[in-house]
């Protein structure tokens, strides 16, 4: 036993720190989920299993409205972002470097670099003046704002997918007298579809989760689920917030698992 | 002649690249880049009485980042309240970076030294919180540290304390919250760097009678340094611009720059100051990101 092999990669204490980190990472989330099923008001004392807080949330008109807006904005914004990102990815990948390429990359990735609070303030100022000038206060401002910051998230998986495809099949299609459009419709598009779906899902999750930009851009009565929750946190937290969080969490995990399965490298 | 045709084909390709990118660029200019120029303009205007601005050139937005004007004699004094907010933001962001590194490095090392089949699982465990709504994670940590939360309840139940420790609405609460929400941002780039690390170098180190500590300091840390820089900046940048976490866990008093900016557009009714603060934050973040890009490039070709 004394001659146990010497593990080179082992560093003392690292394993326990790492395992503690995983416990600390999940403990708060698990607490949140567990107590959303608590029968009582408390988030500390367990008073039995119930779905009361889910029904409370579901019967709350404000929550219903916020859910509807969250889904509508996420669906519209991710549709717009995915469409324009797909086009941009087709334009910027699988070709020699061209003039302005760096500019386009910087523009597309810009929402990832600018602090969210700065973009939020910028959109607040810009849209406030449009709202005053036109008198229109609809959800379209939120949809466009979300579409913009979703673009890099939609673009990156689509570009990754395209870069993994060479031009052989398209060339073969052209050799067989397919038009540009036919080659795109029947060869390129089906091949890049997993990337497009992955990009759309990522954009959807990102839009669904946004707090800061929505908080600044929304007009009165345009709360989404996250901004509704943020507003609720000003008062005492009720397990209703936990219930909404749990639903959002489940949705995120579901979409992410699907995303990983789609983008998994096939060996 | 052929080079002429080539040039034409080249121009056509460039044109199609731009045409295809145009719709994305329009959305981005309209709702991301363009409005930043408006913020820059607003920082040089006069605040309106009920918010918004009056279109008169005024440097006061920038001056009042650091100074306040005395109400009686109009002299400029350093604005202590502002300075304390900046100091808190920088201090908490640096501490967040340090804590996430201290916890994140062993975690990333642990994942990278798992058998390949298990690695994806551990990475997935880091990725889930990474993609989970920041607000939800803040709510979750709030459940743990508030007065009637998990931590205090368990400590009282165990008899360690009799009165709840008040953590919520303090700088410590903000720090715990930020370290919690930004930990994955440290672990992922560190993992990427350690994953490329050649473990044979460790054997070489030990063969030369280096201690574990010496190997860590002289071999591992210098080689994964680009990953450390990347992780630190990925944590520092969002910490500095944090808005949600200090608002929820810090209460109204323990403001950071993000909340201070919001205040100017709300009760503060000083849009030019808010705009100037936003631009300052943007510049600081851009400088940090330039450092990051350089570190990432270095990491990209270590064999070059």
Image: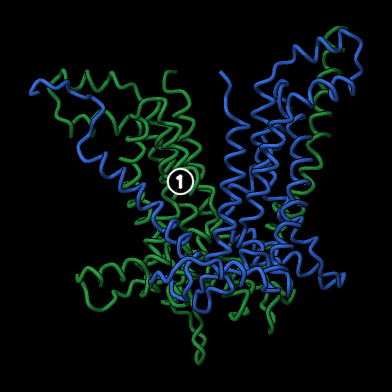
Height in image: B89 above or below A249?
A: below
Height in image: B247 above or below B12?
A: below
x%, y% of residue B198?
34, 21
- Report the residue at 80% width, 11% height from top: A171
Q: Is residue B213 left or right of residue B25?
A: left
Of residues B216 and B281, the one nearer the viewer is B216
Q: Is residue A205 left or right of residue B174?
A: right
x%, y% of residue A60?
67, 74
Q: Which chain is blue?
A: A
Height in image: B263 above or below A92?
A: below
- Report the residue at 40% width, 74% height from top: B169
Instruction: Give the farthest residue toward the left.
Output: A2
Quarter of the rendering occupied by the N terminus of chain B: top right
Of residues A24 and A97, the one nearer the viewer is A24
Can residue B62 be seen here? The reply is no
Q: Quadrant of residue A180?
A: top right
x%, y% of residue A119?
64, 58
- Report the residue at 83% width, 28% height from top: B16
Provide the residue designation for mark 1: B185
Image colour assigned to chain B: green
């Amino acid at each position: 036993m004394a001659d146990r092999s010497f593990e080179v990669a082992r560093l003392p204490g690292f394993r326990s720190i790492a395992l503690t980190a995983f416990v600390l990472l999940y403990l708060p989330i698990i607490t949140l989920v567990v107590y959303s099923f608590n029968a009582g008001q408390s988030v500390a004392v367990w008073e039995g299993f119930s779905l009361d807080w889910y029904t409370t949330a579901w019967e709350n008109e404000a929550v219903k409205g916020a859910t509807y807006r969250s889904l509508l904005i996420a669906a519209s914004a991710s549709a717009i972002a995915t469409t324009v990102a797909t086009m941009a990815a087709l334009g910027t990948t699988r070709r020699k470097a061209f003039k302005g390429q760096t500019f386009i990359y910087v523009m597309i990735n810009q929402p990832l670099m600018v602090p969210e609070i700065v973009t939020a303030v910028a959109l607040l100022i810009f849209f406030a003046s449009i709202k005053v000038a036109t008198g229109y206060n609809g959800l379209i401002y939120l949809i466009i704002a979300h579409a913009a910051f979703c673009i890099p998230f939609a673009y990156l998986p689509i570009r990754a997918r395209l870069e993994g495809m060479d031009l052989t099949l398209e060339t073969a299609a052209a050799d067989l007298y397919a038009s540009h459009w036919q080659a795109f419709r029947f060869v390129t598009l089906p091949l890049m579809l997993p990337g497009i779906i992955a990009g759309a899902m990522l954009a959807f999750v990102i839009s669904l989760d946004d707090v800061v930009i929505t908080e600044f851009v929304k007009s009165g009565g345009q709360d989404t689920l996250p901004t509704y929750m943020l507003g609720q946190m000003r008062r005492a937290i009720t397990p209703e917030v936990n219930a909404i969080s749990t639903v959002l969490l489940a949705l995120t995990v579901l979409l992410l698992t699907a995303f990983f399965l789609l983008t998994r490298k096939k060996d | 002649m052929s080079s002429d045709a080539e040039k034409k084909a080249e121009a056509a390709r460039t044109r199609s690249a731009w045409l295809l990118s145009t719709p994305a660029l329009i959305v981005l200019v309209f709702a991301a880049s363009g409005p930043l120029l408006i913020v820059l303009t607003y920082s040089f205007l006069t605040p309106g009485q009920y918010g918004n601005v009056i279109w008169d050139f005024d440097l006061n937005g920038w001056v009042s980042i650091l100074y306040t004007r005395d109400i009686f004699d109009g002299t400029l004094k350093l604005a202590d309240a502002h300075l304390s907010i900046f100091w808190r933001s920088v201090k908490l962001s640096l501490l967040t970076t340090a804590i996430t590194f201290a916890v994140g490095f062993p975690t990333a090392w642990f994942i990278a030294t798992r058998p390949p089949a298990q690695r994806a699982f551990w990475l997935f465990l880091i990725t889930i919180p990474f993609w989970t709504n920041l607000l939800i994670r803040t709510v979750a940590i709030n459940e743990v540290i508030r007065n009637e939360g998990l931590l205090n309840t368990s400590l009282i139940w165990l008899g360690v304390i009799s009165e709840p420790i008040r953590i919520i609405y303090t700088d410590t609460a903000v720090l715990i919250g930020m370290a919690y929400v930004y930990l994955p941002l440290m672990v992922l780039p560190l993992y990427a760097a350690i994953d490329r690390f050649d473990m044979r170098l460790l054997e070489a180190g030990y063969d030369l009678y280096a201690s574990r500590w010496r190997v860590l300091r002289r071999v591992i840390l210098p080689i994964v340094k680009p990953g450390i820089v990347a992780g630190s900046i990925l944590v520092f940048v969002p910490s500095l611009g944090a808005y949600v976490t200090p608002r929820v866990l810090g209460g109204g008093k323990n403001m950071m720059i993000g909340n201070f900016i919001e205040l100017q557009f709300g009760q503060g009714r000083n849009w030019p100051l808010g705009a100037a603060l936003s631009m300052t934050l943007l510049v600081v973040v851009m400088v940090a990101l330039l450092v990051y890009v350089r570190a990432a490039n270095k990491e990209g070709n270590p064999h070059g």
